[in-house]
């Protein structure tokens, strides 16, 4: 009674109100509650209401239970029907399975029959294979015998190639040396300075000189084609500037166009890149041959040099196109002339060695017929080819097709060693030692008449005839002369007599000219002496980088020798040197000037490339210190501009920069500059050393501080003394040997038996200067140890030299990739170890 207002409402179409009384009555059937009735009323419930509910409650409960039973019955019926359907589906599936099994049984019976037939066939095949096996074994024995024969012939060919290579190397020197004397003497006779020769004698001398020049050209061509045939022709792939190349070609042939009154036209297509990746020297050799032939066989009109993309129709016939090189990735260099042309039937013949279009005894044009043969072989080496188009009487066009980027083919590795039972030494054709000594003793020099005030030239040359010529010409130029027939004697004379200058040959008996040059520049007493090379081999850049003032290749003309003595005289007679410092940072420029000193050097500072170039044009500077970062032009571009100007004499350039160089910049600098120094700790000492070398300053005349710096740099033992080196190796015998050798040089040695011990030792001794790391070790190998060391910032720049006895191909690359600075294969030479230590400890 008295229900709350918010409990439930009684509502209908007319009423919506809360009841005042609530009655709740259970519906019970068989002692189970089947439901509950809840009644609401506005009036009170009476006693008569409850008996009524008790009477009807059982009926209501029965009705509810009946409804629930019907629902359950319906659910069970549906489940039964579903199960019946599933049973029917399973019966159908079983029926199909039975049919399939019956089909499989029939297939098995058929397969069994086929297998029996196949077994019979296999039995017959096995019998045939047995017969074939016997036949193959017999053929293998024959092939093995044939392979042995081929290997023997390959060894013979390799030996023959070695003979040919050594023979060419020797003959290059042996032919050029006497030819040098022939050309010089015949030219001197032809000049007839004393007027003592008749016109016939002069004409004969001129004929000898002309014949010698032609012989020299023939020797060069024969050596080139022999190198190609022997597979000894080296190619040096680099970026070739197309515009610089065309300019050089036009400049080289300008005298010919003037002499023959012909035009020379150069065209470069717009769609070409600035550089192509190939061997510039070999391309120049090929195109020079095209141009010289074009001018030789052209009397009217002229010659056109065209560099472009290949013509589509003609390119489709080339091997480059057949190899899949796209026309847009190829370059065509064509030389066209308005000359005599070549008959069609002889256009292939001209590429054969010693063949010409006109090979008769009455031919009009001379030549050996080797140029085009060499050019074709060189083109093949560069991955290209040569095509010719010619109309007899109208002119010819020779076209060199090249890939824009050279890609070398992978060549099979040659066996490391070839066991030869016979002696493979090839003796060099030369005069007997006794005869040489007698010949040199017969050449008198001025050693007994030299005073400290005299200007003298030391000539180190193994050809007595040429030595005598140089001695006489030295005297004509006002120099006293010293002569030496070998490197050892030359070094003794240089140290004892202190000559004003030295003329040096490379190919010397005993020690070579390179060794002589190295020892001269390592000795403070002789380091300042200017050295000029005259040699049959062409290694000009190497000589310049070692500190030579210049390098000329034999055979040389009297004019060239005059230039040699003039250059020596210019250096010798200039006590105060001129240095140009190209640096936009004023403070850095002043610091460089202070480092180098001012007593015997006048330093001029240029802050821009334009200003520097104008200074260089004056021709007064003996050396240039060049920074790369300049405001108006890159230092590399300035360097290229200086080197490409033929009016500027050869000046040693020291690149002194603080930034990292790109690969392209490195290539240009390596080709044009004498040396490169990266600004940093100790770089000022290196700069002093290099400028002292290239300015030919006398160390004894330098201030004491500078002398101490130079002495420290060149004292090979000083750089090792007091250094601390960690040796990580599991072989204690090896450790003991290395320790014994290094401790003799006052080096402190720490040892780790494996990678883990090495890292622990390094962490305990962070002042270690260098690590010698073995690769094959237990617990932690060298590769892993190096990687762990490099993870620590404080050891990022610590020099690590990898040591290994494995010495397999690719080991060096793996060590460098792991983080090592260098690599040394066991067993190693002690000198090699010390040399490497000096490099990384300096």
Image (cartoon, rainbow, N blue to C red):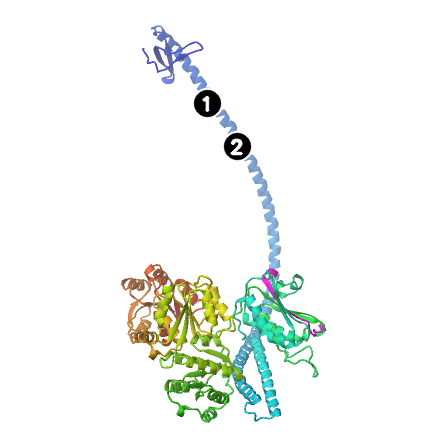
Query: Whole-percent x and y of residue 332?
Result: 61, 65
Query: What distance separates the C-alpha of mark 1 from that of mark 2?
Result: 21 Å
Query: Whole-percent x and y of residue 581?
Result: 41, 69
Residue 86's mark? Answer: 2
Can you say whether 368 is above or below 33 in the image? below
Q: Nearer the viewer, residue 557 or 322?
A: 557
N-terminal label among 1 and 2 = 1
Query: Whole-percent x and y of residue 207?
Result: 61, 87
Q: Nearer the viewer, residue 239 or 722?
A: 239
Badge 1, how many Cα within 10 Å: few under 14, some, many 20+?
few
Image quadrant occupied by the C terminus = bottom left
State left or right for residue 798 relative to residue 120. left
Question: CB atoms at circles 1 and 2 under 8 Å apart?
Answer: no
Image quadrant occupied by the N terminus = top left
Q: Nearer the viewer, residue 87 or 745?
A: 745
Secondary structure type for disc 2: helix
Q: Quadrant of residue 707?
A: bottom left
User: Magenta residues, as a range?
Assistant: 326-344
Query: Whole-percent x and y of residue 203?
Result: 61, 89
Q: How many marks?
A: 2
Q: Is residue 789 magenta?
A: no
Q: Quadrant of residue 386?
A: bottom right
Secondary structure type for disc 1: helix
State left or right for residue 574 relative to residue 113. left
- Residue 351 visible in rendering: no
Q: Nearer the viewer, residue 285 or 174?
A: 285
Residue for badge 1? 72
- Residue 446 visible in rendering: yes
């Amino acid at each position: 009674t008295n229900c709350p207002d918010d409990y439930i409402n009684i509502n209908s179409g007319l009423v919506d109100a809360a009841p005042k009384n609530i009655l709740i009555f259970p519906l019970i059937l068989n002692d189970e509650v089947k439901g509950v009735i809840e009644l609401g009323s506005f009036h009170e419930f009476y006693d008569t209401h409850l008996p009524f509910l008790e009477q009807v409650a059982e009926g209501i409960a029965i009705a509810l239970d009946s409804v629930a039973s019907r629902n359950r019955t319906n659910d069970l019926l549906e489940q039964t029907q579903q199960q019946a359907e599933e049973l029917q589906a399973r019966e159908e599936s079983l029926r199909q399975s039975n049919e399939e099994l019956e089909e499989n049984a029939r297939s098995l019976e058929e397969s069994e029959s086929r297998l029996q037939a196949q077994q019979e066939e296999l039995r017959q095949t096995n019998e045939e294979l047995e017969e074939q096996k016997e036949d193959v074994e017999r053929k293998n024995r024959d092939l093995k015998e044939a392979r042995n024969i081929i290997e023997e012939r390959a060894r013979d060919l390799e030996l023959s190639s070695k003979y040919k290579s050594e023979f060419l190397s020797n003959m290059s020197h042996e032919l050029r040396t006497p030819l040098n004397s022939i050309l010089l003497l015949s030219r001197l006779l032809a000049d007839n300075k004393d007027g003592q020769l008749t016109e016939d004698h002069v004409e004969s001398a001129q004929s000898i000189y002309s014949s010698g020049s032609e012989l020299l050209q023939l020797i060069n061509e024969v050596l080139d084609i022999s190198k190609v045939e022997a597979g000894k022709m080296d190619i040096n792939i680099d970026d070739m500037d197309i515009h610089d190349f065309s300019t050089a070609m036009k400049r080289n042939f300008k005298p010919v166009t003037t002499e023959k009154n012909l035009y020379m036209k150069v065209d470069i297509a717009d769609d070409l890149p600035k550089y192509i990746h190939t061997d510039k020297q070999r391309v120049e050799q090929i195109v020079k041959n095209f141009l010289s032939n074009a001018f030789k066989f052209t009397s009217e009109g002229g010659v056109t040099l065209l560099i472009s993309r290949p013509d589509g129709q003609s390119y489709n016939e080339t091997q480059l196109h057949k190899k899949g090189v796209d026309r847009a990735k190829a370059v065509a260099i064509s030389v066209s002339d308005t000359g005599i042309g070549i008959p069609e039937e002889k256009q292939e013949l001209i590429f054969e060695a010693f063949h010409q279009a006109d090979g008769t005894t009455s031919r009009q044009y001379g030549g050996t017929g080797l140029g085009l043969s060499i050019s074709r072989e060189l083109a093949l080496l560069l991955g290209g080819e040569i095509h010719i188009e010619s109309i007899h009487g109208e002119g010819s066009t020779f076209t060199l097709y090249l890939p824009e980027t050279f890609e070398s083919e992978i060549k099979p590795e040659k066996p490391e060693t070839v066991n030869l039972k016979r002696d493979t030494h090839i003796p060099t054709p030369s005069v007997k030692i006794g005869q040489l000594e007698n010949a040199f003793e017969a050449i008198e020099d001025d050693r007994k008449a030299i005073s400290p005030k005299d200007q003298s030239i030391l000539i180190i040359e193994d050809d007595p005839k040429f030595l005598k010529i140089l001695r006489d010409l030295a005297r004509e130029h006002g120099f006293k002369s010293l002569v030496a027939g070998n490197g050892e004697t030359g070094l003794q004379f240089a140290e004892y007599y202190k000559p004003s200058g030295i003329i040096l040959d490379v190919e010397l008996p005993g020690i070579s000219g390179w060794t002589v040059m190295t020892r001269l520049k390592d000795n403070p007493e002789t380091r300042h002496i200017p050295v000029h090379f005259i040699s049959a081999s062409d290694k000009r850049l190497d000589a310049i980088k070692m500190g030579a003032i210049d390098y000329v290749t034999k055979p040389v003309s009297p004019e060239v020798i005059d230039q040699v003595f003039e250059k020596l005289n210019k250096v010798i007679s200039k006590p105060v040197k001129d240095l140009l410092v190209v640096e936009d940072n004023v403070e850095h420029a002043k610091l460089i000037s202070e480092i180098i000193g001012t007593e015997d050097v006048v330093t001029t500072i240029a802050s821009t490339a334009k200003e520097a170039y104008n200074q260089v044009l004056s021709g007064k500077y003996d050396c240039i210190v060049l920074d790369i970062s300049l405001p108006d032009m890159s230092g590399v571009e300035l360097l290229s501009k200086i080197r490409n100007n033929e009016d500027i004499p050869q000046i040693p350039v020291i690149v002194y920069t603080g930034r990292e160089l790109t690969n392209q910049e490195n290539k240009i600098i390596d080709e044009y500059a004498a040396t490169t120094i990266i600004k940093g700790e100790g770089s000022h000492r290196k700069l002093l050393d290099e400028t002292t070398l290239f300015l030919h300053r006398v160390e004894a005349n330098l201030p004491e501080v500078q002398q101490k710096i130079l002495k420290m740099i060149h004292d090979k033992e000083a750089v090792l003394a007091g250094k601390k080196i960690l040796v990580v190796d599991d072989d204690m015998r090896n450790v003991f040997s290395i320790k014994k050798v290094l401790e003799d040089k006052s080096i402190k040695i720490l040892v780790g038996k494996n990678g883990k011990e090495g890292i622990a030792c390094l962490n305990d001794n962070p002042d270690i200067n260098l690590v010698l790391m073995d690769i094959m070790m237990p617990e932690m190998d060298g590769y892993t140890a190096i990687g762990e060391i490099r993870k620590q910032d404080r050891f990022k720049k610590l020099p690590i030299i990898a040591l290994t006895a494995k010495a397999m191909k690719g080991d060096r690359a793996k060590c460098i990739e792991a983080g090592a600075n260098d690599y040394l294969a066991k067993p190693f030479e002690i000198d090699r170890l010390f040399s490497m230590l000096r490099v990384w400890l300096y």
